[in-house]
Amino acid sequence: MTQDEMKQAVAQAAVEYIKPKLGKESIVGVGTGSTANFFIDALAEVKSLFDGAVASSQATAERLKQHGITVYDMNSVNEMEVYVDGADEFDAELNLIKGGGGALTREKIVAAVAKEFVCIVDSTKKVDVLGEFPLPVEVIPMARSQVARELAKLDGMPVWRENFVTDNGNLILDVEDLEITDPKALETHINGIVGVVTNGLFANRGADVILMGTENGVETITL
Ligand code: 5RP
């Protein structure tokens, strides 16, 4: 089975997982990336079961609209049953690194609103210790160098993601070579650096359930 086939299988499984939670008034939070794209395509098949979606990026909003799914502004939504999104890495405690696609801030906002965060991944995303994947940090443009100096003190190497601007008009620093033994503390610490919008650690609000596509089918992982 290819990685894309695993992503497709897990996306389909996510639709089956959320179906019983949906009602005519439900709003589904939808993430960003290739796995989320497979999810959007599968979600379109059951679009009559729910009202609409909130998108974690402009790209996701476009894809949802192409499928005829109504996209709501986050500010007009008070309640969201479920948020479905991919991840770049996850550990046994369901902590995540996200933001490979640069949508981390909006993803974090939608995850914060949702009652349940369903993370969809293939088995290549599973790690013992987070940090093999460079940690994305969204920064206000004028703070890029200052934030990079602060991040360098954490024993990681910040690398400017050149020619990339987030949907919020900001920049991304990808921090390489981190060994993240306390994800909650590091998430909080980095978010406290002046000029940081947010970082790609989802530990203080991690996933509630992970659906993982493997060679042998989809596994459900909870704590
Ligand atoms: C985007 C993300 C994605 O969820 C993450 O990069 C995983 O992407 P993919 O499903 O393409 O492997 O956080 O900001």
Image (spheres, rainbow, N blue to C red):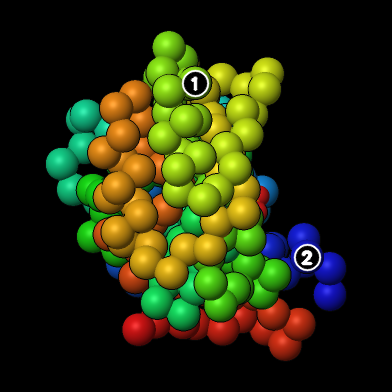
> Is residue 29 toward the left or the right of residue 99 in the image?
left
Residue at 59 percent of width and 42 percent of height: 157
Q: Is residue 155 above or below residue 11?
A: above
Q: Is residue 78 above or below residue 73?
A: below
Q: Secondary structure at mark 2?
A: helix
Residue 145, label in figure: 1
Real-space Cα separation, disc 2 to disc 1, in angstroms? 36 Å
Q: Residues within 10 Å of mark 1 (few under 14, many from 20)?
A: some
**Amino acid residing under circle 1:** Ser
Residue 209 lies, in percent from the top left, at 40, 73
> Is residue 24 toward the left or the right of residue 8 in the image?
left
Q: Which residue is mark 2?
A: 3
> Which quadrant of the view contains residue 146?
top left
N-terminal label among 2 and 1: 2
Residue at the far bottom: name it.
216
Q: Is residue 132 visible?
A: yes
**Amino acid residing under circle 2:** Gln
> Which quadrant of the view contains residue 162?
top right
> Which quadrant of the view contains residue 21?
bottom left
Residue 121 lies, in percent from the top left, at 59, 66
Q: Nearer the viewer, residue 121 or 129?
A: 129
Residue at the far left: name it.
78
Residue at 61 percent of width and 80 percent of height: 218
Q: Secondary structure at mark 1?
A: helix
Residue at 63 percent of width and 67 percent of height: 125
Q: Residues within 10 Å of mark 2 (few under 14, many from 20)?
A: some
Residue 38 lies, in percent from the top left, at 64, 53
